[in-house]
Structures are given as C-alpha cells and as structure tokens.
Image: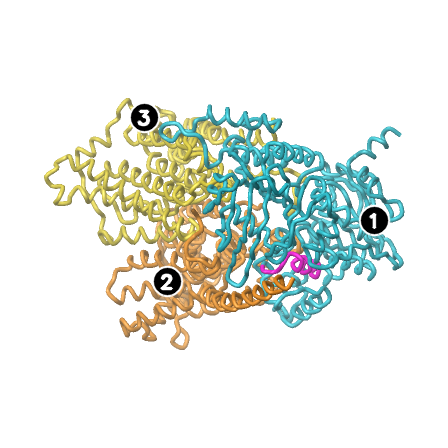
Chain colours: A cyan, B orange, C yellow
Amino acid sequence: MSDATPALRLDGIVKTFPGVRALDGVSFSVLPGEVHALMGENGAGKSTLMKVLGGIYQPDEGQITVSEVPVVMRSPLEAKAKGIVFIHQELSLATELSVAENIYLGELPRKSFGRVDWATLNARTNEILSRLKVGFGPGDRVGDLSIANQQMVEIARALTVDAKAVIFDEPTASLTDAEKVVLFDVIADLKKDGVGIIYISHRMEEIFRITDRISVLRDGQYRGTLETAKTNEEEITQLMIGRKLDLSRSEATHALGDVALEVRGLTVKGLYEDVSFEVRKGEVLGFYGLVGAGRTEIAETLFGLREPSAGTIHLNGEEVRIHSPADAIARGISLVPEDRKGQGLVLGMNCRDNMTLPQVDDLTAGPFVADGAEIAIFDQYRDRLDIRTPGWKQQVGNLSGGNQQKIVIGKWLSMHPDVLIVDEPTRGIDVGSKSEIHNLIRALAAQGYAVIVISSEMPEVLRVSDRIVAMYSGRIMRTFTAETVTEDNLIQAISGIAASAETAA
Amino acid sequence: MSETTDTGGTRAQGAREGRMSGLSKEKIGGILARQGILVAFVLFMVGFALANQRFIAPDNVLGVIRSSAILGVMALGVTFVVISGNLDLSVGSMMSFSTIVVLDLHDQIGPALAIPAMFGLTLLIGAVIGFLVGYLRLNSLIVTLGMLSAIHGLTLTWSGGQNMDIADKEGTWFSVFGQGSVLGIPVPILIFAGLAVVLGLILAKTPFGRKVYAVGGNGVAATFSGVRRARVVFMCYLASSFCVATAGLIQASRSLGSQNTVGQGMELEVLAAVILGGASLLGGSGTIFKTVIGVLILGFIKNGLLLVGLQFYVQYTVTWVIIILAVWLDIAAKRGRLWSPIA
Amino acid sequence: MAPGTLSGLLQKGAIWGFIVLELIFFSVAGEFLSLSDKAFMDLDNMLLLLKQSAPIGIIAMGMTIVMINGNIDLSVGATFALAAIVLLDSMTWPIFAGLGDGVIPVAMALALLTGIVLGAINGFIVWKTGVDAFIVTLGAMLGYRGLVFMYNGEQPTSHLNWTLVDLAEAQPLGLHVATWALLIVTVLAWLVMTRTVHGRNAYAIGDNREAAVNAGIRVGPHMMLNFMGIGFLAALSAVVFYSESGSVNPNDGELYELWVITAVVLGGTKLTGGAGSVISTLGGVIAIQLLRKGLGHIGADTETVNLVIGLILIAVLFLDRQLNIKGKEALKA
C-alpha cells in the first residue's frame, strides 16, 4: 500500500494554544480509496486536527500535502478548493434554503448583475443527486428533509469539488440503522472513485465494518496506525488511553427490593404506545433501541415534561400524576438528560450552583441561600463521584465531558431520588470516564436506587443492566433478563424483526 | 522508546510554562472582563476631576446621582429581565403611564390612595407582559415593543391627550418623593440606593436570584432541574414594573405635572445603562451593582460634559462610543482576541 | 404536502388577508360612524395612504434585508434625521450657490451618501468587533442622534426649495413620487432577495451563519453591505419626505425604528433571521397605515391607534405560535 501516492499526508503538524500544545507532531497519510479511521479520546486533539485540515486553524509547524502537492489553507474555502472536504457532525446547512442552494452555498453560479443562474444550478445539482441516488430534488427545502437526507445534502456538497480527501466527523450520530447502510454505500462509492476518507467515530462496530486502517491520537500526539483487519478493540483502546481498560461486567450480587416504579399502558400519541414495565429498588433497567424508538420520550413523560395521553404511573405502590419536572422531583424521580450541555447544565454557572439548583429553595438561612450548606453538598458529591475540578467556583463549561456528567449525576444524587433515570450516560464521554460512570451506575443500584438507563450503545446496556427493555418504533418488543439476553436477539428485537414474528404467531 | 519519553517531558514542560503565562494573561483578561467597567469608571472620574474641580464636589455628585435616580430605578428592574434572558422595551412608555396615572389620581382620590392604585395598575401591566413572555413563551422583544405602543395609547386615552398637573402644587406632601431630602440626602437617591440594596440582595443571595441566572443562562436546563421557568420570568417582569412604578412616582413627585411622553425613549437609555454595566443580552450574566455603575457612568458623562461647557446632546455621542467600547472589550476579553473572527 | 407548508402559506398570505379585513371593516364601520361623507375606499384616500406609507415603508425594506440577515438596526430614525438635515442644509451652502436648481441632485446625493456612511459605520463595527448588531445600533441610535443635535442645536433646520417641492408633489401616472419610490424600492429589494447571489447569501447567513462562514461566504463585508443598504434607504426616505416638508426638527424620526420593526414583524420576517419576505413587509407597512387612517375614518381618537397596533402585534405573535405549535407532542421545556 505504501507505494501509492497518498491522497492526504500530514507531516509533523504542531499547533499550540496559550497553555496547551494541542497537536504535537502529528504525521500520517491517507491513501486514495482508503477509509482511514481517526480515533482518540475527547481532548486527544482530533477536533484541533480537523480544524487545521479545514483551514480554520493554521499549524505552527508541519506540512499538509494533498496528492503530493504541499498546501497552505487559510480558510475553509481554501481547504475545499484544495480538495479537502468535511461532513460535519453538526449539520452545517441553512434549513430555509433549497437543496441546490445549500449544495452550492458560497458558490452559487452567477449571471449578470449578480443574479443567480438557476438553470445551471439545478442542472449541476441534479447531476450530483443522481450519483447519490437520493429521493429528493434540487428545489426541495432542506428543513423538510429527514436528518439522513440532510446529511446526503452535505455529502452532495463534497461532490461539487474534485475531492481528494473527505472527512466524516461522527456521521452516524443521529442516523437509524437503515440510514447508516445508505451512508456506508455512499462511502463505498467514494472509495471506488479513489477518494481518501478520514472517518472519525467512537463506535467500534462501525470502525471494524468500514475502515481499512486506524490512526490513533492521544494527548495531541500521534500514537500509531493499525490495520483494521489485523487489530482488535482491545489494542485500539489501549493505544487510545495508554492503559488496559476493564470492560468486564460487574455481576450484581445485591438483592432486589420492592417495586419502586410501575408503569402501565403509558402512551403519548405519536411517540410511543402502551408501554408497561416496572423497576425494583436496587435494579438497573436498561432501555435499548434505535434513535426515535421512544425511549427518551418515556423518560421525559416520567419526568413531567410530556403529558401522557393514557396509562398510569405508580411510585412505591401509589398512583401519581406528574405534570412538571418540579412535580417529578418532589416525588423522587430524577432525570440525567441525554443532552448534557443543552438540558443538563447551565454552562455559564459554577459547579456548586449547578449541583444544588433543584434544591436551592430548601438550602436557605433566612431569606438567603446558605452558602455553607451548598458547599458541603458540593464537597460531598465531588469526593463521592471523584469529580476533578479546581473548586466549586469553576464554571461548568470549562470541565471535561466526563466531569460535567458527574456534576449532573451529583445534582440528582444529592436529591436522594427513589428512581434515577439516566439517558445516554456516556454520550460524548471518553473511554476512560465511560467505565467509571458504568461502575458508578452499578454501585448506585447496589445502594438501593432504582435506576433506568437508556442507551444506544449495546455494550453499555449489556454491561450495566439487570434487565433490558428492547424498544422498536414506540413499542416495547421484549424484556430480557441477564440470562435470556444475547446480542443477536437484542438486535432482532430493536430492529422490528421480532415484531413481524410476533404478529405472524 | 527513550525518544518518546523525551518528547513527552519537553511537552509537559512546555505545557506547564505555557499554562503559567496563559494563566496570568487569563487573569488579567478576567479582571478586565469582570471589573473593566469599574476601572473605566474610576479613570473617567479621575480624568474629569482633574479637568474640573467642581466635578467631584459633594453637591455636584449628589446632584448627578439624584438626576440619575429615575433612570437608575428603572434599570434595576430591567436588570432582572435581561439576566433572565429577555428584554423590556416597554419601561419608558410604562413610566409615562405611571406618572400620568398617579398625578391624575392625586387630585381625585388623594395621594395616599393614588400611590397604591398607581402601583397596582402598573404591576398589572407588568403581570400581563410577564404572562405573555413567561407563560405563553412569546418573544419578549416583540411583546414589549407592542406593549410600548399599547401602553402609550393607554396613557393618551387616560389623559385625553392633555398634560397632567396637580392643582395645589404647594399644599401636597406628595412632593416628598421627588423633592424631599433626609439628612441632606435627596429622597430619590435614598429610594434608588435602598431599592438597589434590596434588589441586589435578592438577585445575588436568594434562591429566586439564583433561579433568574439559571433561567437566563440555560432555560431548558433550568426546567430540567425543576425550576419553574415561566414563574421566574413572570416575577422578573413584575419586578421590572414595580421599579417603573417607583420611577414614575419619583418623576411625578419631582415635577408635580407631566406630559404624556415623559418616559419616551427611556427604554433604550435604560437598556444602554444595563448593557454598559456588563449584562449580556443573551441572559445569565450581570449584577445589580454593575448596573448601578452603568447608570452612574451615564449620569456623570452627561454632567462632566456639561461642566466642561458642552451641550447635553454631546453625551449621546459619547455614550455611543463608550457602550460599544465597553461591550467590545468585554467580549474581546472573553474570546481572547480583540478583533472578531468574522471573515 | 410537507408538514409546516400549510402554516407557511397561512403566514405568507395572512398579512394580505388582514389588509382585506381592515378594508371591509373600515368601509362598513365608516358607513355608520364616519363624520365625513366620503367612502373609506375612495381612490384619493388610498393613493394618499400609499404616499403616507412611503417613509416607513422604504426603511422597512432595508430592515427586512437586515433582519433576514440575522441582524437588526435601531439607528434608522437618527440616520433619517441626519440625512434630512444634510439634504436641506447643503442646498444653502455657499459653495453650491452657483448651481441654481442644479444643487438639488447634489444635495440628494450628499444626503444619500450620509445614510450610506452611517450604515457603513454600523456594519463595520458589527463586522470587526463582533458586538451584537442590537447593541451596536442601539448605541448608534444615541450617537447619531447626538450628531443631529450637534449640527444645529435644538433648532429646526429649514430650507424650502420650490422646485424640489414641485418635484416631490408631482404625480406621474397618477401615483405620488413618494409612492413610486416605495414601489421601486420594494421591487428592487424583492429582486435582490429572490434573484441575486447576495440575496440568497443573506438568507443563508441569517439561517446558519456558521455554515455560511464554512462555505466561504465573507459574512463581515456582506453584513456591512446590508447595513449600508439600510442606511441608504433611511436617507432615501428622508429625501422623499423632506423634499416636500422642507423643515426638520432634531427629534424627527424618533421611534421610527420601532414602527419599522413592527411593520417587518407583522409581515412575518423571523426575528432570528433566515426567513422573511420583502413583499410581506410591504403588506405590513400598508396594514399599519390602513389601521391609522381607518381608525381616524371611523372617528376613533388617534391615541387608540397606538393601543390597537400594539395589541395586534402581540396577537400576531400569539397566532404565529399557535399555528406552529405541535400540540401534546411538544416538550414542556
């Protein structure tokens, strides 16, 4: 493979910021027609590297070469002109504009008087869309398309230039399995055309499914390149975190208590239907399913953020109606939401204030907030959860993802809830912190909490759950116990295969 | 292998050095960002004091604060609204309303009843805005823009388009709020200071204040933490209308007569003072103390320019420059570079 | 039909439906209440209405573009006044004494240039400092007003040039010059926003600024151009208005920014940018003027106008929200 001219080569890329050497001599190359995974924990330098490749940052040292031509890129536009194209994790589209306008954003063909040449625009767009075999046209409004189709618009954008290297940044984060297949087909097509592809993802199964080689970054340094066919998960992880990772499941040895939460026939029209389950004290109930299967919506209903159209909720044997998060909290239900930055934390506030927010009304001395009581709570949970922060005054926005998540968990543990719901506990959290949070969830169950864990990651849900509820399209397909669950029947259940079997029977 | 360790060592060292210099830079930037407005205020005062001794004479200083009191009291309330992530463009028009109403009722039902009645009516308007923005979740800019116009109409209807005057200007104790003084300190200053202390404590020290910051910083996260966002926003508008009513009281009491448009245009001046104090229009930041500084800066600029012989309107242009410089330096300190990254 | 299309259509057509309702209401109510014998929908009355819409309307076109672009301009009232002063005063400058009526185009050019420069200053500050346009133009609203006062103190600035007055009072093809100005500006703004690369980029920037930046659109200069545009239009509005009246007070144009924004929002332009239409803004402008005239026609006090416009603005916002709400599916956060 080494004899081919690399599509993209990095030589000794260095980028420093005040106080941080974000990239420290990164060198690797991507061959034409190769899918090259780039892996590393959060903070390892991936995003800085991407910004360097995208022309947003200029490297302090080092050379980027595209098809053996050294390039300097001072802006995203220049990067694109040199043949380096990005498919961003957060879609970078103008949703009110048409598909064609988005694909040629910044490069609309012109006629006299600065007019848009619509005929040329639509013709070119049609040509590209036909290559991608998609079901929408140049005039469709992007905001009306599905997320997957919006991603196709982004990919179509990459095809407008003679792309030498296409960089996919966590492209499957919000795709269904069916949509993933379409995406991987497109990647395969790009591969056939001799484009070099950098594929950034935390998801091992995808890495092994579509990549040819894997390069790993740690602490801003290049740690080596592995051939996908000749390596395994363990080796990659070790390279990423610099030590061995304990991936074993800690067995539940504690006894289960009474039923803490019992849900019967719960329905929110259009989102999920006839959902029934119960969670005991000391038990972790996993919810597994695809994005959009209705798992998060169930959690939101239990937390008073949605009104159920039917069904009952019993807490410790007593029927309850929950109309707001304040209601839910008062009744002992807590939710660690999936969108940590958007829903979990006020990033501009300090660690302590975030942690005590739900109970600030009760932490008073006279009319004022009791500082001492607050700090005591913060200290207690900082120690218990091992939150690494310079102090309670630190703004939460400055913490790492793992520590932020611990603040959210600490916030709810300090409320001593009966039922703790954790939605996507480790999304966007690096590998090392992941296992810490998994152990924490198991420990909480052992202490007698009833815990619901919602996750899209099978290893996670298998590792932490006592029982697993598999959901598909707003319905519970099956509930597995540790004894009955296997990866195969779990996948079947969440992809609706079991559904057709059931109806047939 | 040894090579790797070596680079690792250099790297760590480099990082440590970098972090130290970065920290001090950050610290300076942080101080500037947090206290920049205070530093500017002090420099400004010293400059004008050197130019004209009279500037810092006690009676001049008291005079400035006294004439800033109406704007200041309104700015205290708007600070709550802005920190909660909303805007209030209706305060000027609402202040006209309060002033006209209390003057009119003064002669009809007497001052002792007129004052609570006026407060009640103003708070009612505040509650309407709070309901629209808080509970119905309508855009605050447009709601308060609409209310600006609607309240103006209401004021004109109330007054029949006429100026409002108290019949017996000499014989009423009503003038005490605007013209009286206690121990040599004018009552408007005492009201302004008292309200600033009370509202400052509420914002900085009480659970409600904490929730205002949370709602403005991230309303969704606040809701997910059990904070009743609508209620918090509602209360902020109530606070704002309470301050407006107080400002209207001072205004009415000071002049004992008024035009329908006495507060016109003040909404933007008030906002300017709050922004000058460093509150972000995005919500979640700002303090009562900073707003007071913002108000005083505006007042002293006006006064300083007058003392050096310039017309009152020069302050408009000076205020423009100062607001933009203040906000610019504030965000420049936060982003770590002076010029915007916009291409 | 894709979801949202219906409410989208309703929103687009709503302002015109509202105008029709106003016309019917005032015509019918006028029959019973009006003190004058003239019908409300009298041709002269309607022509006058269009003329009176022009000063706000012309600025509103610029505001539509600026707001679609994701910005706002609160300084238009002050720009309007300063341009008016330059227009009237420059005609009396000694250096132009020899020009005779040739001074008219020169004075107009100077006034328009004033608007462009003031807009450019705003745009440049927004571009280079990264301070939010709301704050920049809030400051400029004060700052430019200060310049207005500095020009002539608290005195009005007056100069009547009768050739100019005749020009302004002309009615080519039956429409007033001011109306022509409004219509031409509307058509041009519509062409720019729907047909040109600049216009489409304006939507893109307002919709997703980051995407626009990544696509290599030079957002800074683009925004500056739009601010120059609204400055130009504020000055044009002044030229149209003061050519006829011939006298400007230093407080003229106060609260214009609020009226203009009201018209733009009534026309359905999103405050957050990315969506809006120049034609609907015209509808918003006409709707407000119709309301003013109509309430006068049925004998309502002028003060009622403010009340009604304020309430309508809030009602529109409320209806818009109700149309877009997704019922029980909505998350209560």
Residue C150's place in the image compared with A488, above or below, is below
Are dots 2 and 1 on a single chain? no
State the residue position of label 1: A262
State the residue position of label 3: C44
Residue B245's place in the image compared with A206, above or below, is below
Cα separation between marks 2 and 1: 61 Å
Q: Which residues are magenta?
A: A398-411
Horizontal side of B83 relative to B256 (left or right) equals: right
Please name the residue shown 63% across and 61% down the image.
A354
Determine which quarter of the picture holds residue A291.
top right
Magenta residue check for A289:
no
Please name the residue shown 39% across and 60% down the image.
B251
Q: Identify the residue at the far front of this view.
A: A3
Horizontal side of B231 relative to B164 (left or right) equals: right
Considering the numbered disc 3 on the image, is that residue within a helix, a strand or a loop? helix
Q: Nearer the viewer, residue A167 or B195?
A: A167
The disc at residue B298 is 2
Q: Residues within 10 Å of mark 2 (few under 14, many from 20)?
A: many
- Judging from the image, mark 2 belongs to the subunit labelled B
Horizontal side of C314 relative to A472 (left or right) equals: left
